[in-house]
Image (cartoon, rainbow, N blue to C red):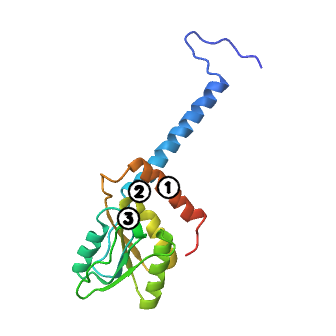
Amino acid sequence: MRRGPVAPGARVVSRRARRWRRIGLALAVFVVVLSAATARLFIWPAQGMPAKVSAIAIMDGPGKILRRALQLARQHRPRFLVVSLGTPGSGYSCPRPVPGVRLICFNPTPASTEGEAEYIGRLARKYHWRSVALVTITPQDTRARLRVERCFGGPVYVMTTPPDPTQTNWPYQIVYQWGALLKALFLQTSC
């Protein structure tokens, strides 16, 4: 196909250059969407809970999770306080009971968020819980909520504590949490 003369100063853009521009634009859109999803899911997730819940459960993780859960229990917001002791090396021990709140401590099997969610689901059925609030670190919020919702039919709320900045490598946490979330979404889909 023959093209007409090009006007002076006009710029001729080849097909290859247009294709690279489209690829660059698609890549830029992907980066923006991934960044927004990362921020929403792992850095600033939605959180909150009502004044009363059937149980508050802490998920194993670094930071001041146990302190936050005990603070909520001392306000008599739950009937039960469930404490995951995590793996033997995590350093958690069962805290002193809070008056008026039933304390249950456990080691999850498997020693993971999946094991914690399964145990919380069993307790919820046994004690007829209507709602559960999870206390975890901010990056684990979305995955913990997803896993517990699969094992418990009632409302699941999440309260987070920021991870300890001296112990948290955010780039690692983001990559790890994306991998763990994708695993929970596509590979480990049951309770």
Identify residue for label 3: 61
Label 2: few (<14), some (14–19) or many (≥20) C-alpha neighbours in 10 Å = many
Q: Residue at x 40, y 86 (%)?
A: 129
Query: Quick one: SS at disc 2?
Result: helix
What is the x, y in percent for residue 52?
29, 81
Q: Residue at x 57, y 30 (%)?
A: 21
Instruction: Assess whether mark 3 and mark 1 are in contact (beta carbons under 8 angstroms).
Output: no
Query: Quick one: SS at disc 3?
Result: loop
Q: Residue at x 37, y 55 (%)?
A: 43
Q: Quadrant of the N terminus?
A: top right
Tell me which numbered mark, 1 or 3, is placed earlier along the sequence: 3
Separation of disc 2 and disc 1 at Cα?
9 Å
What is the x, y in percent for residue 103?
32, 84
Query: Quick one: SS at disc 1?
Result: helix
Q: Is residue 74 left or right of residue 15?
A: left
Identify residue for label 2: 42
Determine whether 161 is above or below 153 in the image: above
Q: Is residue 99 left or right of residue 50?
A: left
Instruction: Assess whether mark 1 and mark 2 are in contact (beta carbons under 8 angstroms).
Output: yes
**Foreground disc of the pair 1, 3:** 3
In the picture as drawn, the residue positioned furthest to the bottom comes out as 127
Q: Residue at x 41, y 75 (%)?
A: 156
Identify residue for label 1: 178
